[in-house]
Image (cartoon, rainbow, N blue to C red):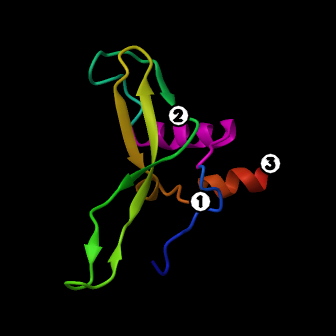
Amino acid sequence: MAGEKQFDDPSGLLDELARERIRDVLAERGAMRPCSRCGSEHLGIFPRLSYVQLQTLAESIGGRIEEQSAPVVVVACSNCGAIYQHALGALGLMGITDEAKSNG
């Protein structure tokens, strides 16, 4: 879609510096609290982005169909395995994989 940020790295690989930046932003917004399922404080950020597929849109009956997805960072509890997803756009981190490559 026009105007949307396209990632150069389709693997969504996050280096340690990118994960630190994500951790900092999540902490600033109060999103690195203990696990809501078991209370553990041991949460980790997955080393790759994930993508949540959004509802398919059709311009008209029989028209072009366009699929969209939202990049998310995944945080998991190392005790019970609960998974939390955070939209990169809402965190202001849409270019995080590009930044990681330019710093490397």
Q: Is residue 88 above or below residue 24?
A: below
Residue at the far right: name it. Answer: 104
Q: For the view shown, which residue lies furthest in the front direction?
A: 62
Q: Which residue is mark 1?
A: 95
In the image, the segment drawn in magenta is 12-30
- Of residues 51 and 84, which is closer to you in this image? 51
Numbered tag placed on residue 20 in the rendering:
none
* Residue beneath the point at 44% across and 18% down: 78
Residue where numbered disc 3 is placed:
104
Q: Is residue 29 magenta?
A: yes
Other-residue count near label 3 (Cα within 10 Å), few / some / many at <14 / 14–19 / ≥20: few
Asked if the magenta segment contains residue 86, the reply would be: no
**Residue at the spot x=41%, y=43% of the render?**
29
9 sits to left or right of 48: right
Mark 3 or 2 closer to N-term? 2
- Label 3 secondary element: loop
Q: Main secondary structure of the magenta part?
A: helix
Q: Nearer the viewer, residue 14 or 10?
A: 10
Whole-angstrom CA distance, mark 1 to mark 3, is 14 Å
Residue 32 x, y percent position in the rendering: 42, 31
Q: Secondary structure at mark 2?
A: loop
**Three-letter residue code for mark 3:** Gly
In the rendered image, residue 11, in percent from the top left (x then y), is placed at 60, 49
Residue neighbourhood size for the residue with mark 2, other residues' Cα within 10 Å, grouped as few (<14), some (14–19), many (≥20): some
- Relative to 100, residue 65 above or below: below
Q: CA distance from mark 1 to mark 2?
A: 17 Å
Query: Measured along the vertical axis of the image, is residue 61 above or below residue 72?
Result: below
Which of marks 2 and 1 precedes in the sequence? Answer: 2
Foreground label between 1 and 2: 2
Q: Residue at x 49, y 57 (%)?
A: 92
Disc 3 from disc 2: Cα separation: 19 Å
In the picture of the structure, the residue carrying the numbered disc 2 is 46
